[in-house]
Every structure is written in C-alpha cells, then in structure tokens.
Amino acid sequence: MEFSDPILLIVLGAVIGIYAGAIGAGGGFLIAPILLLRHPAATPTEITAATLIYVIINSAIQVLLTIRDRRIDGKLILLLAVIGVPAAILGGLTTGLIDRIYFSFAFGMFLVLIGIYIIFRPTTVEDFMPSDGWPRKIKDRQGNLYSYSIPIIRSGVAQVGTAFLSALAGIGGGPIGIPVMTRVQRVPHNIAVPSMHLLILIQSLSVTGIHFLNNVGGSPLNDIPWLATGLFIAAPIAIKLRQRTGEGSLMRALAIGLIIIGISAAGDIFR
C-alpha cells in the first residue's frame, strides 16, 4: 500500500491530529502503522524516529494553544519527566534490538490490550482526593478549581513502565499515559489531557535526540513534513472537540482506534 500524494498525507496528518489532540495523545500510534505500510523496507528504529517527530510537532502545538487556559500541572509534569525520561531513553535504545516482524506483532498486541482495558474503564474514578499523597490544586482561566492528590510511589512506578513501553513502541505516551494519569495518578481528565501533551513533548524530544545521535534516517522521514502540515489545520479543531465532548466518549473513541490499528499492525507478521 502506497501513499504517494502529498495532499493525501496532509489530510491524514490533519485527521490524525484532530483525533490525537482531542484524546491527549501525540498520534504516534496511528502514524506508525501508516509508515509501516508505506515503507516496508524501513527498520523499526527508522519508523520510530519519524513517528516521534510527528508526535513532537503535534504536542508542541497543543501545548502552545492550551497553556493560556492554565490547565497544565507543570510541577507534576516536571516530576514525571524526571522519572520517565531515563526510562523513555532506555526504551528508545531497545527498539533497535528488536526484529521488525516481532516489533510489529508486539506493537499491535500492546495496542489491542490497552484498547480493551479502556473500553471497560472509559471514565476516571470520582475520588481524586485519597487520604495520602501529594495534594494539588489547579485554578484554570475560567475560574474552575481542580483539587486532587497524587499517590507518589505508585505514580512513579507507573510512569517508569509507561515511558519505557511508549518509547519502545514509538507512540509518544498518550494512549497509555492518559489512562494511567487519570486512574493511577488520579488527575482529573480536564487537567490530564493538556498536561499529557507537555509530558509527551518532553519525553519524545529526549528519545528523538538519541535516535539522531545514532544517525537514524531513512525514507519515513520524507513523509513527516506533509503529515505535520496537517497538524496546523488540526490543532484548533482538536481543542474545540475536546472541550465539547465528554471523557467517556473520547476514551471509547481512543479504545476503538487502538484495537483496529493494533490488529492491523499485529497482522504484519502474516504478510
């Protein structure tokens, strides 16, 4: 399957950007299968490096457009980044040690499992203030006050696993990170999504730097300018969609996409 028309790549980049921006993902879990199909001779490391560039651009635009709403928990993200960046770098280095066939299959099954989990748990728990933990209060631009408490130890353990697996798969972190942030770390969804975009940006930059220090190139990089162009169209639409759509609907949409793309990627082992 080939996508040779730049206009089609721009449209794909925009559609994925709308979807990913709304649910709090970088879009790598959708871009990676497209690159796998378009560049059958590319290595997992080349696919991952190109995917992460798209993720970086998407998350950077989302952060710039939402920072004025004051819904990003900067202190929490700084802590999670300190914990997660070393794990993300390790995950990025591990990618090059995996055969392409096993990479595609593992990548696909990983997405399917996450999708099934989200279908059964589409919304967050109601109690954001457990008796122990790090108390947080965020007041957004509209005057809404969000109070929650972060369980430090389990949040740190979850962040290490999330960062490593996300970098290994080249998906930026959102598809795993949002369920973890809202359920394990107990962050309200309205704070979690914009905050996750900042965390995705930090972690993806660190992993991408490792790839390019290792002189990773390849044909997948040629598609990124066109795919990224669509993000400038998608970003404001994604924000409006996120504001008007409930958490449950957004998470179910994420789950369906993860399962469909996961099955497709896993099927690469039979091709």
Image (cartoon, helix red, strand yellow):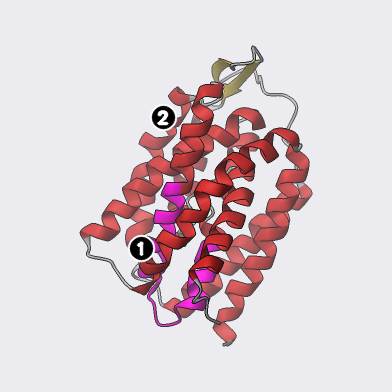
Residue 229 vertical placement versus 159 (above, below)? below
Query: Which residue, as the protein is rendered here, is positioned at the far front?
Result: 7
Question: In front here: 237 or 99?
Answer: 237
Q: Position of residue 78 (x, y in %)?
A: 40, 29
Quadrant location of the N terminus in the rendered image: bottom right
Residue pictured at 61% horizontal, 79% vertical: 267
Res 94 label = 1
Res 104 label = none
The magenta segment: 30-57
Res 79 label = 2
Q: Position of residue 224 (x, y in %)?
A: 42, 62
Principal secondary structure, stretch drawn in magenta: helix
Residue 19 vertical placement versus 60 (above, below)? below
For the question of whether residue 109 can be seen, the reply is yes
Q: Amino acid at mark 2?
A: Leu
Residue 268 vertical placement versus 25 (above, below)? below
Q: Amino acid at mark 1?
A: Thr
- Local packing at callout 1 (Cα closer than 10 Å; few below 14, some 14-19, many 20+) is some
Residue pictured at 61% horizontal, 61% vertical: 111
Residue 41 vertical placement versus 113 (above, below)? below
Mark earlier in primary sequence (1, 2): 2
Q: Position of residue 225 (x, y in %)?
A: 40, 60
For the question of whether residue 179 can be seen, the reply is no
Q: Quadrant of residue 141?
A: top right
Q: Position of residue 117 (x, y in %)?
A: 71, 52
Q: Distance from label 1 to label 2 (Cα)?
A: 24 Å
The answer to whether residue 22 is magenta is no
Residue pictured at 51% horizontal, 33% vertical: 65
Residue pictured at 46% horizontal, 51% vertical: 55
Q: Secondary structure at mark 1?
A: helix
- Local packing at callout 2 (Cα closer than 10 Å; few below 14, some 14-19, many 20+) is some
